[in-house]
Amino acid sequence: MMAASWISDTTLLAVMLATLMPLGSFLVIMVFTRHHPRLSAGLSIFAVTVSLVFSLLLLGSHWAIESPIQYTGRWLVSGEIDIPFGYLLDPVSMLMLCTVAVIGFLIQVYSLGYMAGDPGFSRYYALMSLFLWAMMCLAVSPTLLQLYIFWELVGLSSYFLIGFWYERFSASQAGKKAFVMTRAGDVAMFLGILLILLHLGNLDILEIDSPKMAVHMSPELLTLSALLIFGGIIGKSAQFPLMTWLPDAMQGPTPVSALLHSSTMVAAGVYLFERLFPFFLFSPDAMTFGLTVGTISMLLASTMAMVSRDIKQIWAYSTISQLGYMIMGLDAGAFFSGVFHLTTHAAFKALLFLCSGVFIHTFETNDIFELSKKGARGLKVPMACALIAAGALSGLPPLSGFFSKEIILAGLADLSNPIWLAAALLGAFLTAYYAFRPIFIILFPPSSEKKQKPLSPGFHADHTGSHHGGRYWAMAWPLVILATVTMLLGFMKVPLEHFLTGQTGVLKFHEISHHDWLLYTELILAAGGVVLAWLEFGRPGSAQVGFVERIPALNRLFAERWYMDHFYRYVLDKVVDKGISKLFAQNDNKVIDGAIDGMSKGTVEMGAFLSLLHLGMVQYRLMMVFIVMVLMTIYFFFF
């Protein structure tokens, strides 16, 4: 721990500027510039640019960091409890801070074209600034309490952004669903945090990750607290069984989806796992549970993506599946595999969503068959970038996803039970299939629909039917940059591995073995998925019907998301509405209302009785006086 002046310490000043600038822009926009859209956008982009510059400076200047740097100041004091607030800088937090800043900057620039003309333009940029501030502060939190506070702020700001077009009923419902389902996981996480606080006495992340935890908590309590905290990861990263809120969250603007899926909201869950990775290692049972959840989520989401027609929902299912992959890698003990795949995924998933945003903005439909029919293939830049991103998602070389997936599979291959590796390999095949299915559908429409001339590059029809090349290129340049990052990031594997695990000496947990046969198997399966997608959707004369869609029962099962929403609806109707709610209603009617009615009735009857004494009936009063006098005479004479 270090105490330093923020003026004299350049590192502290840099991290403060990097994290606080988005908050400043949010406040200025909401208070002063809401009625000036261009100024609001300029302020927000300037703030995230400052964050990006200082995040990169921090990463570059501390590339050879030997031990974590922590800045804390006293925030709250109550008795013996001292709650600090500050920053924790280590390879994991600095890499995440940079990832959020880079993706956030590109999406803010892209939004200039996508959100142009929207009546809520200033509000959009204000909320995006709030979202980025919460996520950046979460990344550098030195304590679990501070992390939890910003964890909730990320959830709150995502609720505002998912329901940004709140006048749409579906958007407001999607925002509520995301808020409620993630809260279920957050409650479990909070209980886990309290359990650690009770036994360790503080929530310092470095102490929680140290061997000291095994001294303060029994193995059973460690497992319980790890499982409770993992509940928060399940909710935030949309893992089984709390996964259906994420596809519905596509009701928000597409840039929001890109940010939410790539480096912020859902990435926060996996980031928490990375942050507490040594702590989770204390409990092999919790690791096995996480491995099971990640595997189920990865496979279920893959099947859902195979039959969806909505391009944004396909990428949303893909996000769940890839997050499952990351959790599998971490639970296999391969720390770097999870961190690296989270980083590469941020780039190619943001790219996929932003490319889809150009298609949707131009043709006003999310349906991949409609996009194909309307000539989306004519938008050369987004089409080429989507192809690169789909290749990375599928794990094709030399794109970044190939390198990060390979080390996840290598980590799983080191486990004694081969079922985890077999599931991951099946997932690799399914991923390649569902990633190239929409690409081939859009690129190769049926011959009867090829008569429509595709749009020329640089032209873009807005909602009024006019063309604005400037807006198109405002959206296109971030795509080109992200595509370049997607192509090059895989070659940063060795330096990043050295940065994350080789210098501090803290995170050396598991040496991953490399197997040549596994590399070839992965390539064959990924290529098999692409070829099958080509035969079914890209080949001239193909019916563009997948093998799953030829089996109606299976198609319906996947399209209905394995009936998970139906199960939740049934539980809500039968257990919550007709069970718990009914019990509470009966309690209200019979206990609370009954008690109040009884008291009211007793008060009325007592009042009626007492009112008899105030009726002015002299004869009754004289009779009472006579009776009292007789009783007193008897008492004094005979007792």
Image: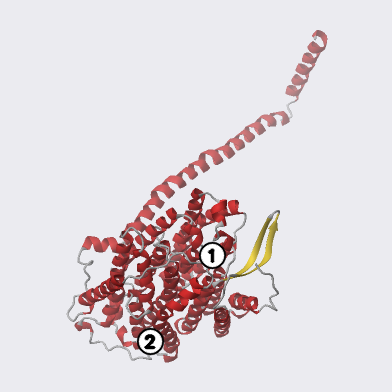
**Residue 432 is at least partly visible in this image:** yes
**What SS does tag 2 mark?**
loop
State the residue in front, 275 or 159. 275
Q: Residue placed at 41% from the left, 81% from the top?
A: 491
Left or right position of 486 against 16: left
What mark, if any, has residue 217 been given in the picture?
none
Amino acid on which disc 2 is placed: Ala
**Residue 43 x, y percent position in the rendering:** 58, 82
| Mark 1, other Cα within 10 Å: few <14 / some 14–19 / many ≥20 | many
Graded by Cα atoms within 10 Å as few (under 14), some (14 to 19) or many (20 or more), the crowding at tag 2 reads some
Res 252 visible: no
Label 1 to label 2, Cα distance in Å?
39 Å
The numbered mark, 1 or 2, whose residue comes first in the sequence reads: 1
Q: Residue at x 35, y 70 (%)?
A: 514
Residue that numbered label 2 is attached to: 461
Is residue 425 shown above or below 190? below
Outermost right residue: 636
- Figure colour scheme: secondary structure
Q: Residue furthest left?
A: 541
Camera-nearest residue between 159 and 348:
348
Residue 585 screen position, x and y as percent? 49, 44
Question: Which residue does the numbered mark 1 point to in the structure image?
Answer: 151
Q: Is residue 223 above or below residue 116?
A: above
Left or right, 421 with respect to 6, comes to: left
State the image coordinates of residue 270 (x, y, percent, origin top left): 46, 66
Residue 50, position as x, y percentages in the image: 58, 82
Question: Is 598 located above or below residue 538 in the figure?
Answer: above
Q: Residue at x 65, y 78 (%)?
A: 13
* Image quadrant in which you'd find residue 396: bottom left
Element assignment for label 1: helix
Closer to the camera: disc 1 or disc 2?
1
Quarter of the image containing the N terminus?
A: bottom right
